[in-house]
Amino acid sequence: QVQLADSGGGLVQAGGSLRLSCTASGGIFRTYGMGWFRQAPGKEREFVAGINWSGGATGYADSVKGRFTISRDNAKSTVYLRMNSLKPEDTPVYFCAAARIGDYYPGSAQYDYWGQGTQVTVSS
């Protein structure tokens, strides 16, 4: 059973930075495509960023492009999301997700495993 533990959320002022981490256990992390999603109360979960199994391909939502960077360390079974120039609209709960097929996808249905979520709050 694969488990994802995401962490690193917190309270930050607008313009600040945070780094989220997601560590996997119980599976073959280096073969998974990984994604970060976020979800505000009453809204659908939305794609933020994704990275393929090798780290050679990444993708971002338009709303975060140029501000967020996804990366991975397969030796540590960990994927990161570096978030710079944070805005109040970046506030919701962030979830990491793993796709067994090895690539990343903007749709949440393609992911097989999910972390428990970490709250990010950006104050104006």
Image (tube, rainbow, N blue to C red):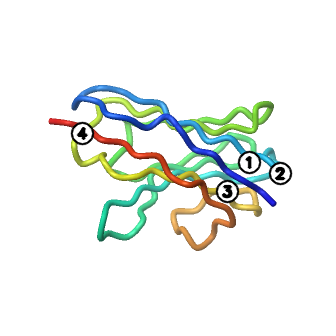
Which amino acid type is shown beneath numbered disc 3? Ala
Where disc 4 sits, the SS reads loop
Tell me the quarter of the image containing the C terminus: top left
Residue position marked by numbered label 4 in the rendering = 87
User: In front here: 5 or 19?
Assistant: 5
Residue 121 shown left or right of residue 100 in the figure: left
| Residue 76 quadrant | top right
List the single residue furthest toward the left: 124
Rendering coords of residue 113 (x, y %): 67, 62
Where disc 3 sits, the SS reads strand
List the single residue furthest toward the top: 16
What residue sits 78% from the left and 46% below the top?
Answer: 25
Q: Earlier in the sequence, mark 4 or mark 3?
A: 4
What residue sits 51% from the left and 37% below the top?
Answer: 81
Residue position marked by numbered label 2 in the rendering = 26
C-alpha distance separating marks 3 and 2:
12 Å
Mark identifier at residue 24: none
Which amino acid type is shown beneath numbered disc 2? Gly
Which amino acid type is shown beneath numbered disc 4? Lys
Q: Earlier in the sequence, mark 2 or mark 4?
A: 2
The mark closer to the camera, 3 or 2, is 2
Give the answer, above or below, for where 19 lies relative to 4.
above
Mark identifier at residue 53: 1
Q: Earlier in the sequence, mark 1 or mark 2?
A: 2
The mark closer to the camera, 3 or 1, is 3
Check contact, mark 4 vs mark 3: CB within 8 A: no
